[in-house]
Image (spheres, coloured by chain):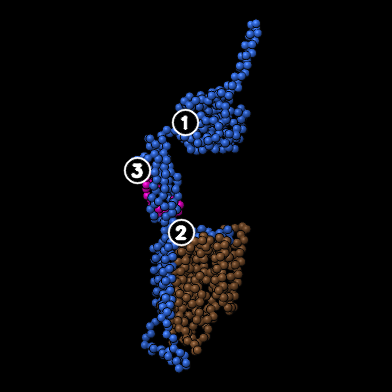
Amino acid sequence: MDAVLLSGISRLALALLLLSIPLRASVSILLSPGTPAPDFTLPDIDGGSFTLSEQRGTVILLDFFFIECSSCKVALPDVKQLLADFPSGFRIVSITIEPGDTEAKLKQYRGQEGIAWTILRDTLQMYSSSYSVSVAPTFYVIDAIGVVRFVKTGGIDVYEILRPQIAYLIDPRPATQLTAQLSATTVEAGSTVTVSGSITPPIGGGTVSVRVTRPDSTTTDLSATIGSGGSYSGSFLADKEGSWKVKAIFAGDAAHQPSESAELELVVKPSIPWLLIGGGVVVIALVAGTVWYFILRKPPRTGEPPPPPPTAMEPLGIPPAPVPTRSLQLFSTAATFAPVALLGVSAAAIVFGADQYAWIQVYVRVLCTTCIGVG
Amino acid sequence: MHRRRVTPIFLKLSDLRKGAQVLGFVVLNLGFTAALKTGIVCPALFCYACPLAMFACPFGTLQHFVVLAAVPLLAGGTIGLYTTLLGRAFCGWFCPFGTVQDIIGKLNSKKLRVSNFPWMKFVVLGAALVAAYVTTETVFCRFCPSGSLFAAFPYVFMNAPSPIPAGIWVHVATFLVVVFGVLLIERVWCRYLCPVGAIFGPFNKVSFLSMKVDLSACGDCKQCLRACPMGIDNVEAIGSSTDCTRCGKCIEACRKGLIRYGMWLAKSDIEVPKSPT
């Protein structure tokens, strides 16, 4: 009886034990935020090792993955973007949970995918023991003192979900948003351009630095004070033709994170050399006048008898010229002044078309491949 | 009514003209740095793709604006300014391609006297503008012999492309055709084909500068017409014809000094005898 009972109990225990394996796997519970991250030391694929507890002062993103995991590949661009967004105070560590991912395979994978962070091999199988990972990828965000702050599974929306968490851990100050706009996007050289914008949340009394990059790549920083409503403005002289870049920068303060506006482009066209054109016209007029007066002008007659009157031909039967009508006189007068009218029209066209100077200058400066037959 | 034969005080008219042509050649080629490359339209057929170009070609610029479907206010105004002042005188006194034709033409002293077709250059002008609009590129420039000489050939010498693009061979062909033509007919390009001449020509009738011909004493010797490089065949058309480049060779040729340059408000005294009815 006892033997039968013992046998039954032992079979029941074995059955429960067998049942508990998948049950345990299916209900594995990830580490909760606030839990100290279990320390570990694992080999990396370059022959070194990595110890979590040695990374104090740095925010760590643990990425549990394996090579053949398609969701892990989906997440890779987001992970790369996170590294680009936080170049300091932040480190990514990928840990392969597949024992079949050998060093050689992992190196090949790193090269193929352009991974620029540490890759470890989980030789301790700690993914299942201490970190309870059952989904690949699983991301653990660990703060600078080694505490788990956020956990995410799956490869979708990695960047959108993890970025604010990491940003907060790196810098817990509230984020700011800075906008900027130019008073004009195309101006003539020598014009004054105003940069204005606002910062959110409004930080009255703070300072925004407007970085102006000239066409020759030299930069100038202008300082603009933020008003009580969060707006700011500053001006600079666009004194050189070409493409200028303008960006507003808030350096941050004790209670706010730094931020930058989008980079704005300003096209500065060459100023029209009115002085040169005017001077040239005057010089041409003077030269032309001098040439005409001294070289081409008919000299005044001196002491020469007046020519015989044309009426001398009248006896041959040629009738005198008809007296022009009034309309013909008006037409003749109008025709006489046609050059003046044309000159006025031309001058008006030049004035109104002055902004086309830069267009035409491009034709002279840029090789026209069509014109010479090579384009 | 005899007039004094017009001779400059210090230099002959032909010397002045040659000096102006040299000056035009030099001035247009001063764009050897980007700082000297202006956006000013020049009064000559001179390719702005030239490595040394300082000014923009008037016809190339007009084609560009046709392609852009924009009104060429600045280019049009500048051309209007030039031509209202001096008419087509730039062709005779300034245009480097005209100068090149004069130089090449000296290689053959026995040229053909052929009729003028003043309408032909206007056809070229209209066709080139229509082609630019339809194809949305500066088609005429692909064939322009001035572009051949001042831009395509320098490009080949400076860049030594291999193989030489087909477009360059087109330029070689058009330039050789013009060279051959100039050896047979004086200023053949300016006479028949130049679109810039077509634009400038009509302004001869209204420009401040004019040519005054005293026909009352004209003996009809036709020396002025024989000297005309543009083949004008009518004394009364001197100065006002769309072909006249106001080069002044007729002034030098007239033994009686009956032809002279005139200025605005004095142009109405061009004397034409009244024929008996």
Q: Is residue A275 left or right of residue B109?
A: left
The structure residue drawn at horizontal position 37% and vertical position 49%, both measured from the top left corner, is: A235
Colour in which chain A is drawn: blue
- Mark 3 = which residue? A227
Q: Is residue A1 left or right of residue B96?
A: right
The structure residue drawn at horizontal position 43% and vertical position 68%, both measured from the top left corner, is: A345
- Residue B102 x/y as whole percent: 54, 73
Q: Which residues are magenta?
A: A219-244
Query: Farthest residue toward the top?
Result: A1
The mark that comes first in sequence, 2 or 1, is 1
* Relative to B180, residue A255 above or below: above
The quadrant in which residue A268 appears is: bottom left
Callout 2: chain: A
Q: Secondary structure at mark 2?
A: helix
- Mark 2 = which residue? A358
Badge 2 crowding class, 10 Å Cα cut-off, few under 14, some 14 to 19, many 20 or more, is: some
Q: CA distance from mark 2 to mark 3?
A: 38 Å
